[in-house]
Amino acid sequence: MLDKFFNPKSVAVIGASRDETSVGHAIFKNALKSKARVYPVNPNAKQILGVKCYPNVKDIKNEVDLAVIVVPAAITPQILIDCAEKKVENAVIISAGFSETGNKSLEAEIKRLSDELGIRVIGPNCLGVLNAKNNFSFFTGQFKDGEIVLISQSGALGVGMLDWIIDKGIGLRSFVSVGNMTDVEFSDLVEYFSKDKKTKVIALYIESFKNARRFLKACSKSNKTIIALKSGSTSKGGKAASTHTGALATDDNIVSGAFKQYGVLRVGEIEDLMYCSLASAWMPKPAGNKVVVVTNAGGLGVISADDIEEQDLKTAEVPVKELSKFLPKNWSHSNPVDLVGDARADRYEKVFRSLDKKSFDALLIILTPQSMTEPLKTARSIVDFSRKIGKPVYTCFFGGEKVEKANEYLLKNNIPVFEEPGEAVETLKLLLES
Amino acid sequence: MLDKFFNPKSVAVIGASRDETSVGHAIFKNALKSKARVYPVNPNAKQILGVKCYPNVKDIKNEVDLAVIVVPAAITPQILIDCAEKKVENAVIISAGFSETGNKSLEAEIKRLSDELGIRVIGPNCLGVLNAKNNFSFFTGQFKDGEIVLISQSGALGVGMLDWIIDKGIGLRSFVSVGNMTDVEFSDLVEYFSKDKKTKVIALYIESFKNARRFLKACSKSNKTIIALKSGSTSKGGKAASTHTGALATDDNIVSGAFKQYGVLRVGEIEDLMYCSLASAWMPKPAGNKVVVVTNAGGLGVISADDIEEQDLKTAEVPVKELSKFLPKNWSHSNPVDLVGDARADRYEKVFRSLDKKSFDALLIILTPQSMTEPLKTARSIVDFSRKIGKPVYTCFFGGEKVEKANEYLLKNNIPVFEEPGEAVETLKLLLES
């Protein structure tokens, strides 16, 4: 049943509008790009963007798989009744003005109707869905198919993360803004996407649960990596969360303990949610705590060594004799392997080839643009090597525009790119403990 | 005496080269753009980039304020002797191959010569200097004058930070790659830049000290904000640092205690060094711990409230009645002030104007691009407001390309821009404790 939210053959946008600044216009326009047949519904328009407009969803002759409801909150119950008459079984309610503004009775009404009429509802007070498989999206922006599903209880934060992902050209399987979750909630979505072969990671931003036990059960049954940023963890944050989505705060320690028990990786920052998702989707999980760092910048090597020790990981042994055969005299003679500032791509590559695969669990490659540096060529070597090695390979090319193309190339080839070594090491630690 | 490193009227680049891939070429080419007269010195070339080349620094008839030495390490002593004969009093030795490769005697020889001949030396094993005042730079890239001086013991990391700064269009007063510090070291530079009126912040990347006591004394006497990332803080990092610049590790707790006592703000990550520098250069220090958060994204409000509580800061009281007069019904009715997703710039502005200045110490403004959002217009309101308020104003516009122009505008107008609320709150906390 949930499949029609993501792969509808026909969609009615109820509240589609000619006003280009309105949400009803934007959603309709974006939905038009999908493979689905999209009908605008609005009693005050004859056509929108050249598409024939219907006064009521019931006036559409063909079948409607999914209704998207963008009308004032007060009339949403009537719209649901219309949808039921039209035999629509799935509805996304974008409209706001329910429990989050104190209007609990209206939200209860929606819940009652969706149960009685047998309509599955995402929302209300949400921003909708995106599904790469059929190019179906409520959102502007070019996206590409990938292995990560992002589910967010905060629409705006979700869209912020979505933009971050789209901006970097990272693939995304699906995005869901769940809103107030009167019906469809985290558990349903975890169950649904756990059945999707391409999905590898389900990343969640959670403020509160409707049914925490069901969620944990769904997670423990899933064969996907599930990563959650659960906010509202402090008393102030919990208070802010309750006004935001009408959420009830949960004791934070219980949450952490339960997540651990049921195999949910809990992270504390937005950045961690993004980076852990990329690293899990693209790289194997680290099998142990021994890290090799290869760098052309001594300082970043020193910082990495600090980070590794602070996170209770280990710097692996490296074959010093072997490496000394071709590295310049002033290389570091230990791990972090400081290749020295004039390293070209081939020096990186030779080091990769010289490493004993059994001696380490993860590789962190650092590069700063110096006069001899070949960022893009080095990125190519990394991509080739990472495909052979079967261990997590993380990168940190540090230096603005000069490494931009190399970073794009790495991301395009599913190599995690970090902004500084500390983030890479933290991600390794989080995944190792998960 | 140190002034000739940064404001030389005439510079000899000894080891300037016609080979476009060489460091000697790049430095010469970059130095040519400055106001100084620049002479290439190379016995094997008649001219370089159309400029007459001299076989020896002694052959230059005019005075030479600064020698830049980019020759093989072994002949640097002879070059220093030549410089002394030419009465050059300042030399930057770029050449590597000294204590960092185990060649301690050659480094001792350089030190002895610089003392005996009375030549102040930056380096060896460094990447040189940049000074915005006279457009003097060893580095490629457009930079603009600013309030921050960046001093780095790691050349590559320094250049990485430099690129980050240049890339964002942030102003920089000066950059110094100090290398092995046989002569000029952190203390000298802190003393020198403390006398520069425009400089507000001195940011340092430190692996080790030549004379820690002198450094601390210089810092305590300085009226600038001094922020230091001291790495090699763990045993592994310390080991890496000692091979990197031949540095001797210091007990880490002693470092932290001494920094605190002498007014040096110690940070733990590269990001913190950058953000604390921006925030200190552009904004007043927070006078207390009460923060107001204004956001159009409820989720980021919740996360901010968590961050604020986790860092032992406080969410300030906000004038709920006053704000309710013009905010939509479903605003959060507390701090974080959630303006709701459809907030345009004027809604932000009205909130700024309604705040009681006495009730808070810092303002964090969050924005995610939603359908009604006006990022650039909101950025303009923030710039106007921040000029009047006399308190730190930090921003976090979250959402890739859609907020790029707004973020550029904010940075151009000296408003700190953070990648997520957690970083802004951490920076506030660090500066509050400094």
Image (cartoon, coloured by chain):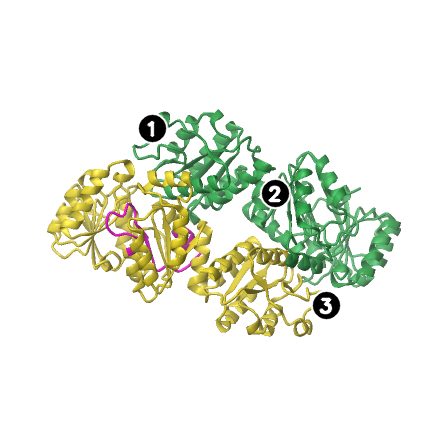
Chain colours: A yellow, B green
User: Which picture quadrant has residue B79?
Assistant: bottom right
User: Helix, strand or loop at disc 1?
Assistant: helix
Q: Nearer the viewer, residue B34 or B356?
A: B356
Mark 3, Cα crowd under 10 Å, few <14 / some 14-19 / many 20+, is some
Instruction: Indicate the position of residue A36 as horizontal and vertical percent values.
Output: 23, 58
Q: CA distance from mark 1 to mark 3?
A: 69 Å
Say what amino acid the circle numbered 2 marks: Lys
Q: Are marks 1 and 3 on the same chain?
A: no
| Chain ID, mark 3 | A
Quadrant showing the C terminus of chain A: bottom left
Instruction: Indicate the position of residue B117 as horizontal and vertical percent values.
Output: 88, 50
Q: Is residue A58 above or below residue A417?
A: above
Quadrant showing the N terminus of chain A: bottom left
Magenta span has A163? yes
Magenta span has A146? no
User: Which picture quadrant has residue A330?
Assistant: bottom right
Identify the residue at horizontal 45%, vertical 50% (top origin). Answer: A268
Instruction: Indicate the position of residue A62 as horizontal and vertical percent values.
Output: 13, 57
User: Helix, strand or loop at disc 2?
Assistant: loop
| Chain ID, mark 1 | B
Mark 2, Cα crowd under 10 Å, few <14 / some 14-19 / many 20+, is some
Quickly name the residue at label 3.
A329
Q: Is residue A31 above or below residue A339?
A: above
Between marks 2 and 3 in the image, the one whose residue lies nearer the viewer: 3
Identify the residue at horizontal 60%, vertical 41% (top origin). Answer: B277
Residue B210's disc is: none
Left/right of residue A409 with respect to residue B244 in the rendered view: left
| Chain ID, mark 2 | B
Q: Is residue A411 above or below residue B280?
A: below
Quickly name the residue at label 1.
B324
Find the magenta span and give its range.
A162-187
Say what amino acid the circle numbered 1 marks: Ser
